[in-house]
Amino acid sequence: MKPGFQQYPQHLTAISTTPARRRKHADCSVNYTHELGDEAKEIAGRFVVRAVPLLYGVLAGVLMGNLAAGLLVGGLVSLIADVTMGSHSLLRGLLGSRRAASQTSA
């Protein structure tokens, strides 16, 4: 050890010196989970199915040097994937609501 330096004992922190509080309800605790609920998983999956073709279309358009063509192909694939979702389809919902609105106004 260098001259002039002293070795001090390890300092105790407030956490280690404070006694643990007694819990009123020792058997009760909050159960947190890192997993998504079933509905959130379903929504996230539908978003991915719609967004990934658009992203690949942009990537292909940039690589080909024609962004408009890439967006067009990506958009078409995304629309086809959306229509095949059945009752969860956004496009079918939009077209169905427009048809219902036009039939009620006529």
Image: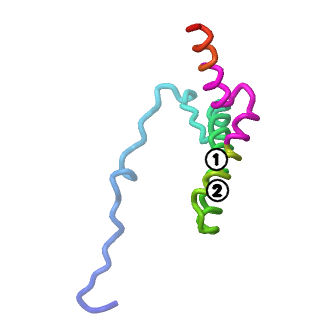
Q: Residue at (63%, 18%) from the top-left corner?
A: 99
Report the side of 50 relative to 28 (left or right): right
Vertical placement of residue 41 versus 101, above or below = below
Vertical placement of residue 82 versus 14, above or below = above
User: Where's the N terminus, which quadrant?
Assistant: bottom left
User: Where's the C terminus, which quadrant?
Assistant: top right
Q: SS for tag 1?
A: helix
Residue 37 placement (x, y as % from top left) = 64, 33
Name which of mark 1 and mark 2 comes first in the sequence: 2
Q: Residue at (54%, 31%) from the top-left corner?
A: 30
Q: Is residue 18 magenta?
A: no
Q: Is residue 95 magenta?
A: yes
Q: Report if the CB atoms under discs 1 and 2 are less than 8 Å apart.
A: yes
Q: Quadrant of residue 82?
A: top right
Kindly identify which numbered label has been placed on residue 65.
none
What type is the residue that disc 2 sits on? Gly
Would you name the residue on which mark 2 appears? 57
Which span of residues is magenta-colored? 79-97
Between 78 and 16, the one nearer to me in the picture: 78
Kindly identify which numbered label has been placed on residue 75.
1
Q: Residues within 10 Å of mark 2 (few under 14, many from 20)?
A: many
Residue 57 placement (x, y as % from top left) = 64, 56
Q: Residues within 10 Å of mark 1 (few under 14, many from 20)?
A: many
What type is the residue that disc 1 sits on? Gly
